[in-house]
Each structure stands twice: as C-alpha cells, then as structure tokens.
Amino acid sequence: MRWLGLTLLCLAPALALATDCPQPLRIGFVDDDASPYVRGRGSEFQAEPGSTVLLTRQALQLLNCPAELVRRPVRRLVAETLNDQIQVAMLMRADAPDRAALGFPRLPDGRVDPRLALGESRVVLFVRRPAAGQALPKAEPAQLSLGVIAGSPVEATAQRAGWTYQTATSRSSALAMLRGGRFEALADVEGAVPPEELQREPALQALQPPLQRAFFHAALSPALLQAQPQFAQRFWAALCKLSRPSQPGLGPCP
C-alpha cells in the first residue's frame, strides 16, 4: 500500500489546486478580431485562436482548473463580468470608464499593477495609403475626421481627449467606412488589423508615432475577486509567467 500513499502525496498539490478553482469559471473574450491576441470574428474560436486564447488555456492547465471560454460583444462582455455571469474578461483596459469596477490586479496604492499586464496596447490612426508622390497626414486627431469602434477602450480615449468622431459597430464596418471615405482616419489599437487586411485595396497604413500607450489585463468579476482573492493572484501570476517570453518589454513578473 506504500505506492498508494506515495501516489496520493504526489497528487495532493494538483488536488488542492483543483478544489480551489471557481465553479463555474467562464472566461470571456471579445467577438471581434483582435489579432494577434484573438483571431477571427463571431462567437466561435478559430483553429488558430490567437496568442491570448492559447495563453489562457496554458494557464488553466498549469492551475489544473477547468473553464469554459466564450466570446461576446465588448459591452456585453463587460456587463456579464460585472454581474458574475462571466468570471474573467480578458484583454481589458482599466482606463475605460465602464471597466473601472472590474477586478484588476492592483498595487497597495490602488493603481493597476502594470507588472501583471498581458500586453501593451498602442492607439494609432489608420489612414488610406496616399497615392505615389502624396504625403501622409500627420497623426493629429484634431486635424482629421475620425472614426472609432463603439464601446471600445479607444472610444473612451477619444471621449477623454475631446476628439470629434463617428462610431462604427465593429472593426470590419469601421474599416469599410474608412475605405469608403466616411472618415479620414480610424483610431484603433496597433496590431489589431492583420497585415493582409492592410494590404487589401484600397490599402491602409498606420500613422506614427502612437497617440497613446496603455496596458491590458485579465479582469475578474468583483464577486470572484472578493470570494477567492488567492485564486485571483495565482491566475494573474500564471498568465504573467507564461506571457513574458513573448512580451519581454513588459518587464519581470512580481
């Protein structure tokens, strides 16, 4: 019977982790394309789902926690996480007003902890590539007619900055409006538009330098963070540990 005792001893850490996993545990992602982090559109995940989806699955495996991964429109994702219908919303920025009440990792002084960020987002202006001999416009929002995606963190940025803009319901419709001349520039996150989409005629180009840099995190429902703060810390730590090889610019994990 000694082998049984040794087996149970070896399994004890995994069993302890499993019993601490929230149930249910639903982890939500936006249903629009946010490449390279989440690829494709709609409620289903692609065969190559994106780097943050893969990262999340690896973290859950490391913690020995089962979970359901879902996709939602961004406003619904935030609302369902606030109501604990979804327990974790991935790729959230704390500076958007409707996300302030979500459970972000915080420093003792109350600031969101940048050391536990999943990545850094850079807001840029996408414009139609000018014809040969014509110059690119300067990245000055006040000098261009702008479009933003409704409900996105970039819209919150535009509101705070006092920019005048039109809204689109999704990234695909925003790109169509930009190509169709409905506005001169689309304010969006750098890297959100795949290279092949930028090259499609009429071709698009991102202006430099970025308008803003911000961090995004895994945000927990307030109910989960209050009920299981130790799980929250382990989940954030696992994501950080797994993400740093591909995000060295974020610095070491705490």
Image (tube, rainbow, N blue to C red):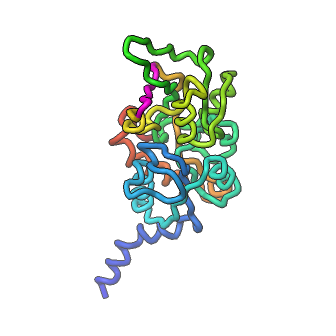
Magenta segment main secondary structure: loop
Q: Is residue 185 magenta?
A: no
Q: Position of residue 131 (x, y in %)?
A: 41, 18
Q: Quadrant of the N terminus?
A: bottom left
Q: Position of residue 154 (x, y in %)?
A: 60, 33
Q: Position of residue 70 (x, y in %)?
A: 54, 59
Indicate left or right for 71 with 237 as reference. right
Q: In the displayed orientation, state which residue is furthest to the left.
A: 3
Any part of residue 230 in sight: no
Quadrant of the rendered image containing residue 85: bottom right
Q: Which segment is the magenta one?
A: 201-208
Q: Quadrant of the C terminus?
A: top left
Indicate left or right for 7 with 236 as reference. left
Viewer-nearest residue: 38 or 173: 173
What residue appears at the point 44 percent right and 43 percent down from the top-left corner? Answer: 35
Any part of residue 95 in sight: yes
Viewer-nearest residue: 80 or 47: 47
Residue 162, compared with residue 22, is above or below; it is: above
Q: In the displayed orientation, state which residue is furthest to the bottom.
A: 1
What residue appears at the point 55 percent right and 31 percent down from the top-left corner? Answer: 180
